Image (cartoon, rainbow, N blue to C red):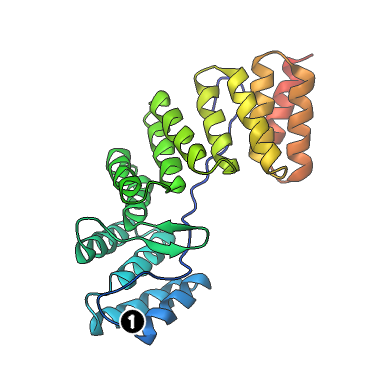
Amino acid sequence: MKSKAGKLTGFALVLFVLAAFGCSTTPPREDLWIGEFYYFAKMFDEAITACTNEIKVNPNSWESYTIRGLAYTEQGEYDKAITDFTEAIALYGPTSPVLRIRRTVMPPYRGRGYAYYQKGDYTAAIEDFNRAVQVWLHDSASYNYRGIAYFRQKDYDQAIVSFSEALRVDPKFSIVYSNRGDTYYNKADYDRAIADYTDAIGLDPQLVVAYNNRGMAYYNKADYDLAIADLTEAIRLNPDYTGAKENLEFVQRRGQ
């Protein structure tokens, strides 16, 4: 995201990965577990092949459709991913399933919403993230993604509501503080932006985007020394961070 003064960077868009499965209507075959293994190994072609083999024998395996949808998403084949997530939802019923994953659960609605988001269909994405949190009220990831989709639509107030819901569910979700800070920044509410970036850094001192973005918020308050300190720290943490380097040069010129 670009601002009138330097660049903001941020937003976490990483799907949680599968760790285990819920209950299926028919016993899973070996290909399903092989598909899971390949997905974890980032061998997405092999994961797709294994899940396809499972579906041929067990066409009601919504788990296989979900894993294959995730693999297609990783490959950027969003239309195929949407088709698979839709099939998973249809097979399980109107309430949609949730898959047990590390530290949380994964409704296929979230996977489909993420694919819609990547296609730039933010309205469809928001609808699916809404369904995801209806299925599982503690789905902090879907609240976060919904906030990002609202942000892309420039509906900053709704974005803040969604990010705040994500933090209500998971108060230690560091990137969400940074995302909400970005939203306050775009509303020119720099004090709240700085507060959120500071909370994000407190939870994750290695979160370089929060240092960069807090630096730019300080710049907009004419706190040039603090801005330079944050941008310098972002570069120290990631010497290849081009955006922070450009911002530091920008602030140094303007602060003279």
Picture mark count: 1
Using the image as rendered, state which of residue 71 and residue 58 is in the foreground. Answer: 58
Percent coordinates x, y for residue 250 in the rendering: 70, 23
Q: Read off the residue under disc 1.
A: 28
Percent coordinates x, y for residue 172 in the rendering: 60, 43
Q: Quadrant of the C terminus?
A: top right
Q: Is residue 152 left or right of residue 83?
A: right
* Residue under the point 52% across and 62% down: 102
Using the image as rendered, state which of residue 243 and residue 172 is in the foreground. Answer: 172
Percent coordinates x, y for residue 71 in the rendering: 40, 66
* Residue under the point 38% across and 68% down: 67
Question: Is residue 150 in view from this perspective?
Answer: yes
Question: In the picture, residue 124 is in which quadrant?
Answer: top left
Mark 1 burial class by Cα count in 10 Å: few <14, some 14-19, many 20+: some
Percent coordinates x, y for residue 150 in the rendering: 38, 33
Does 234 sit above or below residue 13?
A: above
Question: Is residue 1 in view from this perspective?
Answer: no
Does 227 sit above or below residue 208?
A: above
Does 221 sit above or below residue 179?
A: above
Q: Secondary structure at mark 1?
A: loop
* Residue under the point 64% across and 31% down: 197
Disc 1 marks which amino acid? Pro
Q: Is residue 45 left or right of residue 238?
A: left
Q: Is residue 140 left or right of residue 56?
A: right
* Residue under the point 46% across and 55% down: 15
